[in-house]
Image: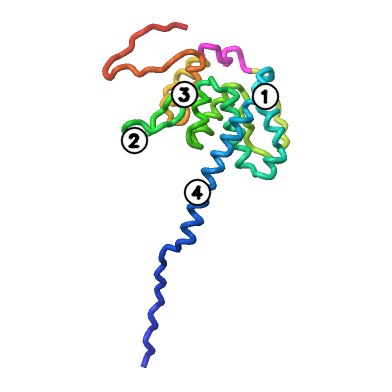
């Protein structure tokens, strides 16, 4: 006679209030970190030397608190530097994602100073745009740099193979639509045009904008 198979024990889990408390405290700590970093950067903005180039201006202040950042950690330093960068270039125009009246995200032009008070992701993206505008973008990668492999110089192109300015412009123009409609590149293109004094507006539906251009 075969033995009856023993039913597997089913464990019914329920919410542990202590775990919930720890999760909530973690969320509050993260928000507190951002708030404190913004407060610190706002005070440190008074130490920025306008006589120095933008990168040196920010770096000089950050270096004053090197020991503090070592103790506080990389995340604190990153948030502080982003906020300080926005203070340093307060009037620089940037493009950030905000929630529109319909609840959907929309690209909104604003200034670096106003972007300081926005949520973390919007603030960090605005700081990145400021660095790009001022040519002080953070270098990607780290660690030991690999030695570039030596390559044999290419033979000079024949005269008829050299791209002219017209060719380069035409190639850029052919690719422009793809970049302009891209969710990542579009806001940066618009923000850069704003720094040059231009604004982008969409033609009314069904209306064709006519014009002539020659090279």
**Dot 3: element:** strand
Marks 4 and 2, Cα distance to the nearest angstrom?
Answer: 24 Å
Task: Of the two numbered discs 3 and 1 on the same chain, state the one appearing first in sequence.
Answer: 1
Task: Of the two numbered discs 1 and 2 on the same chain, state the one appearing first in sequence.
Answer: 1
Instruction: Note whether 163 is above or below 7 in the view shown.
Output: above
The N terminus, quarter of image? bottom left
User: For mark 2, what is the residue?
Assistant: 103
User: For mark 3, what is the residue?
Assistant: 110
| Residue 46 horizontal/vertical position (percent) | 63, 25
Between marks 3 and 4 in the image, the one whose residue lies nearer the viewer: 4
Instruction: Note whether 188 is above or below 160 in the view shown.
Output: below
Q: Quadrant of residue 143?
A: top right
Q: Give me the residue at 60% from left, 24% from top.
A: 88
Q: Is residue 104 left or right of residue 95?
A: left
Q: Give me the residue at 51% from left, 17% from top.
A: 195
Q: Is residue 159 magenta?
A: yes
**Dot 1: element:** helix
Question: Residue 27, labelled with which disc?
Answer: 4
Q: Give me the residue at 49% from left, 60% from top.
A: 19
Marks 3 and 1, Cα distance to the nearest angstrom?
Answer: 23 Å
Q: Which residues are magenta?
A: 157-167
Marks 1 and 4, Cα distance to the nearest angstrom?
Answer: 33 Å
User: For mark 1, what is the residue?
Assistant: 57
């Amino acid at each position: 006679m075969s033995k009856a198979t023993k039913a597997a024990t089913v464990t019914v889990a329920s919410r542990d209030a202590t775990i919930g408390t720890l999760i909530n405290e973690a969320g509050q700590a993260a928000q507190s970190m951002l708030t404190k970093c913004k407060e610190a950067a706002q005070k440190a903005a008074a130490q920025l030397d306008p006589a120095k180039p933008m990168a040196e201006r920010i770096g000089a202040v950050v270096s004053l608190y090197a020991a503090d950042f070592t103790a506080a950690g990389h995340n604190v330093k990153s948030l502080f530097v982003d906020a300080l960068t926005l203070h340093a270039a307060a009037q620089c125009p940037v493009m950030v994602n905000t929630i529109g009246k319909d609840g959907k995200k929309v690209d909104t032009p604003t200034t670096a100073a106003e972007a300081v008070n926005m949520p973390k992701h919007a603030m960090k993206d605005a700081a990145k745009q400021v660095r790009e505008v001022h040519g002080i973008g953070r270098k990607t990668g780290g660690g030991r740099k690999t030695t570039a492999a030596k390559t044999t110089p290419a033979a000079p192109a024949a005269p008829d193979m050299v791209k002219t300015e017209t060719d380069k412009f035409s190639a850029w123009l052919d690719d422009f639509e793809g970049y302009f409609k891209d969710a990542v590149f579009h806001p940066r293109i618009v923000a850069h045009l704003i720094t040059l004094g231009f604004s982008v507006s969409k033609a009314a539906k069904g209306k064709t904008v006519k014009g002539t251009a020659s090279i």
